[in-house]
Image: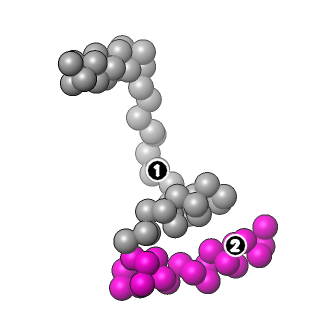
Amino acid sequence: MKPLRALLDRVRPLFEKGGKLEKLYPLYEGVDTFFYTPGDVTPGPSHVRDSMDLKRMMITVVIALL
């Protein structure tokens, strides 16, 4: 896993602001996050969705599709 981490760290400047592949930064970040835990975490408790919240959201989706 160390070679993969080294590769991701080596190409990171290409994807950051001002790099050649700046537009593909979300793709790079997705791959990096898939393989490794991100360094920043939620400072407080995370938002928990209950069944009623999910039901309201899905009703909105169905109405939007109609």
Camera-side residue of 36 and 45: 36
In the picture, the quarter occupied by the C terminus is top left
User: Magenta includes 3?
Assistant: yes
- Residues at badges 1 and 2 in contact (C-beta under 8 Å)? no
* Disc 1 packing (10 Å; few <14; some 14–19; many ≥20): few
- Asked whether residue 37 is in view, the answer is no
The region drawn magenta spans 1-22
Q: CA distance from mark 1 to mark 2?
A: 23 Å
Is 46 left or right of 53, judged from the image as shown?
right
In the picture provided, is 33 more to the left or to the right than 55?
A: right
The single residue placed furthest to the front in the displayed view is 66
Taking depth in this image into account, of 40 and 44 the one nearest to the observer is 40
Residue at 44% in and 45% down: 44
| Identity, as a three-letter code, of the amino acid under mark 2 | Arg
Which residue carries the number 1 mark? 42
The residue at which mark 2 appears reads as 5
Look at 25% across and 23% down and name the residue there.
Answer: 65
Image spot of residue 64 (x, y percent): 21, 24
**Dividing the picture into quarters, in which one does residue 53 lie?**
top left
Residue 16 part of the magenta-drawn span: yes
Query: Where 60 sits versus 37, above or below?
Result: above
Q: Is residue 58 visible from the viewing direction of this image? A: yes
